[in-house]
Amino acid sequence: MALNFLSPAEIKAISFLDSTKSNLLPKLQGGLSLKRKDCGGRRIQCSVQNQNQPPPAWPGRACPEPGRKTWDGPKPISIVGSTGSIGTQTLDIVEENLDKFKVVALAAGSNVTLLADQVISRFYAVKNVLYLIVRLCALNSVIPNPFPTRELEVNGSIPVKTFKPQLVAVRNESLVDELKKALADVEEKPEIIPGEQGVVEVARHPDAVSVVTGIVGCAGLKPTVAAIEAGKDICLANKETLIAGGPFVLPLAHKHNVKILPADSEHSAIFQCIQGLPEGALRRIILTASGGAFRDWPVEKLKEVKVADALKHPNWNMGKKITVDSATLFNKGLEVIEAHYLFGAEYDNIEIVIHPQSIIHSMIETQDSSVLAQLGWPDMRLPILYTMSWPDRVYCSEITWPRLDLCNLGSLTFKAPDNVKYPSMDLAYAAGRAGGTMTGVLSAANEKAVEMFIDERISYLDIFKVVELTCDKHQAELVVSPSLEEIIHYDLWAREYAASLQQSSSPSQVFA
């Protein structure tokens, strides 16, 4: 099968049509419907649910239950994926707030060196007596800790035990001996459990109240399910938990009365905006997007894109996968699906807007047309912290958490995204409306397509084609209410099928 570039005309043919202007139902070439619902002018209520859809985590509003326990001492948490970006930032938060949180279990994939460092006691040089007094008071919960320990150089003069996990897991079983050797001199040795089972045990550790899930991909599904079944609240930083696993995970969370608290900045913004809303007040969700590397490129130039071009994000220096997703806007399409599962909004009531400054992280509109927004510097620590502290707010030092200054910031700008430039939006909305296993297939196919693009095996525009063809092929086997095993099966199938599209094409056909 040859993969050919999508021309602007072909891309336009699969874009949404305004239902107020036309009754025609646009279709993807594979037949996925892009139908927009005609509401006929009646009142729109985001939290009204289709009977075939799983219950949302937060049906248009968020209120703590009466009598919800608040913690007088440190709140016990476990971290799945402690050596990744989410895990290390979570530990930064714990280290700065030892009076608020404590770590009872850590799980990592293969970075044994960093995992061991997270367990071993740390030693810091004291720069002045005042700092020592303030720091020791903070460590003993006498006063809030205004100084992060990471500001100091490690010289070995004052011992400060920061994290003393009871359990540690390394997913790569072949590295367990190396981990044991690294922890040989630790006085209070944690229990070590290797492999997938160890990660699961960390997720459902009996002393943990909340679990931060930072493992990337469907590998994070099983430990998340184990944590839910054990009654742990989920600090959700793993997209696949809902994008692929939503039809299974959400009913399970409701069964066990578990809260799913979003750590993604956009969904955290929405979550913060719906605090205390009355039932039925949510009308629309507005997700903001930076626009990625090609927000200022004309559509005609996209056929010339090289990998280096896609990796030039205008705002941040990030990993290759997320940077390409930002360029294609697949990251935002996947966030639309996640917002649907989290907050129960119909897809017609979830919109994307390009906001180049990335200061407004997302917005909601209420029934009376008021628009509420959450603003802040782009810093993942804030949404992570809120998942850990909710419904409370934790004081943050200006030293490590700079406060937003709108006057110095200047202007904030917005523009509508171009469906022709970003066909990922239509693909994501179509997959979301199909539901079931289709959303996981979309995510997995995109991940494989991006990998092939980065390896220069397909072109930039072929990313969209690979995803579309994979979703089209999956329609015959779509499972509306899948089991966990079916979700994982079709995740693997989508990756294999997407890879087969490139393998069945000659380089000359792919790089037309």
Image (cartoon, rainbow, N blue to C red):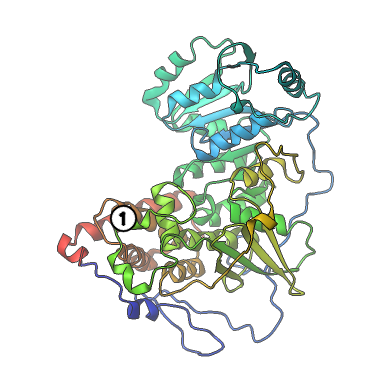
Identify the secondary structure beneath mark 1.
helix
The residue that appears at 70% across and 39% down in the rendered structure is: 398
Image spot of residue 283 (x, y percent) = 69, 71
| Quadrant location, the N terminus | bottom left
Would residue 107 appear left or right of 459 to someone viewing this image?
A: right
Would residue 13 appear left or right of 399 to someone viewing this image?
A: left
Image spot of residue 357 (x, y percent) = 56, 59
| Quadrant location, the C terminus | bottom left
The residue that appears at 75% across and 71% down in the rendered structure is: 370
Q: Is residue 496 above or below residue 94?
A: below
How many numbered discs?
A: 1
Q: Is residue 141 above or below residue 268?
A: above
Badge 1: few (under 14), some or many (20 or more) residues near its Cα, within 10 Å?
A: some
On the image, numbered disc 1 is attached to which residue?
A: 307
The residue that appears at 60% across and 33% down in the rendered structure is: 92
The residue that appears at 49% across and 21% down in the rendered structure is: 116
